[in-house]
Image (cartoon, rainbow, N blue to C red):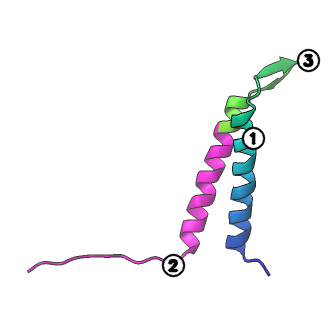
Amino acid sequence: MSTDIDKLRQIKGQILDLVAEYTVNPKPSYSLDGQSVNWTDWFQAMMARVREIDEMIAETEPFEFHTQAKT
Protein backbone atom coordinates (compact mmCIF):
# COMPACT_ATOMS: atom_id res chain seq x y z
CA MET A 1 0.00 0.00 0.00
CA SER A 2 1.49 3.31 -1.01
CA THR A 3 1.48 6.31 1.27
CA ASP A 4 0.84 9.92 0.35
CA ILE A 5 4.56 10.64 0.36
CA ASP A 6 5.11 7.72 -2.04
CA LYS A 7 2.46 9.18 -4.34
CA LEU A 8 4.08 12.61 -4.18
CA ARG A 9 7.44 11.10 -5.09
CA GLN A 10 5.83 9.22 -7.98
CA ILE A 11 4.14 12.38 -9.28
CA LYS A 12 7.42 14.29 -9.00
CA GLY A 13 9.18 11.54 -10.94
CA GLN A 14 6.55 11.62 -13.68
CA ILE A 15 6.86 15.40 -14.01
CA LEU A 16 10.66 15.17 -14.15
CA ASP A 17 10.37 12.49 -16.85
CA LEU A 18 8.24 14.88 -18.96
CA VAL A 19 10.68 17.74 -18.37
CA ALA A 20 13.64 15.53 -19.29
CA GLU A 21 11.92 14.52 -22.52
CA TYR A 22 11.22 18.19 -23.29
CA THR A 23 14.87 19.16 -22.76
CA VAL A 24 16.01 16.43 -25.15
CA ASN A 25 13.41 17.34 -27.78
CA PRO A 26 12.39 20.98 -27.19
CA LYS A 27 9.29 22.21 -28.96
CA PRO A 28 8.70 25.68 -30.36
CA SER A 29 5.96 27.89 -28.97
CA TYR A 30 3.21 28.67 -31.47
CA SER A 31 -0.23 30.16 -32.07
CA LEU A 32 -2.89 28.47 -34.17
CA ASP A 33 -6.48 29.56 -34.73
CA GLY A 34 -6.35 31.98 -31.81
CA GLN A 35 -4.85 29.48 -29.36
CA SER A 36 -1.31 29.80 -28.12
CA VAL A 37 1.03 27.13 -26.81
CA ASN A 38 4.06 28.46 -24.96
CA TRP A 39 6.46 25.64 -24.11
CA THR A 40 8.72 27.94 -22.07
CA ASP A 41 5.81 28.76 -19.77
CA TRP A 42 4.95 25.04 -19.58
CA PHE A 43 8.53 24.20 -18.58
CA GLN A 44 8.57 26.89 -15.90
CA ALA A 45 5.20 25.71 -14.55
CA MET A 46 6.42 22.12 -14.33
CA MET A 47 9.57 23.17 -12.48
CA ALA A 48 7.44 25.24 -10.06
CA ARG A 49 5.27 22.17 -9.49
CA VAL A 50 8.40 20.10 -8.68
CA ARG A 51 9.45 22.72 -6.11
CA GLU A 52 5.97 22.64 -4.56
CA ILE A 53 6.07 18.86 -4.32
CA ASP A 54 9.55 19.02 -2.76
CA GLU A 55 8.15 21.36 -0.11
CA MET A 56 5.22 19.01 0.57
CA ILE A 57 7.58 16.06 0.90
CA ALA A 58 9.87 18.02 3.24
CA GLU A 59 6.90 18.94 5.44
CA THR A 60 5.96 15.29 5.95
CA GLU A 61 9.42 13.87 6.61
CA PRO A 62 10.92 13.80 10.10
CA PHE A 63 13.78 16.20 10.73
CA GLU A 64 16.37 17.12 13.34
CA PHE A 65 17.87 20.41 14.42
CA HIS A 66 21.60 20.30 15.12
CA THR A 67 22.72 23.04 17.45
CA GLN A 68 25.87 23.86 19.30
CA ALA A 69 26.21 25.89 22.45
CA LYS A 70 29.28 27.42 24.01
CA THR A 71 29.82 28.72 27.50
Disc 1 designates what residue?
Answer: 21
Residue at point 46%, 76% (across, down): 63
Secondary structure beneath dot 2 equals loop
Secondary structure beneath dot 1 equals helix
> From the viewer's perspective, is the residue at label 3 or at label 2 nearer?
2
Amino acid type at image mark 3: Asp
Residue at point 61%, 55% (across, down): 52
Amino acid type at image mark 1: Glu
Residue 30: quadrant of the picture: top right
Question: Nearest the camera: 71 or 33?
Answer: 71
Amino acid type at image mark 2: Pro
Circle 2 packing at 10 Å, graded few (<14), some (14-19), many (20+), is few
> From the viewer's perspective, is the residue at label 1 or at label 3 nearer?
1
Above or below for 10 versus 24 = below
Disc 3 designates what residue?
Answer: 33
Q: Is residue 45 left or right of residue 37?
A: left
Circle 3 packing at 10 Å, graded few (<14), some (14-19), many (20+), is few
Going from N to C along the chain, the mark reached first, 1 or 2, is 1
**Distance between the Cα atoms at labels 1 and 3?**
27 Å
Tally the marks: 3
Disc 2 designates what residue?
Answer: 62
> From the viewer's perspective, is the residue at label 1 or at label 2 nearer?
1
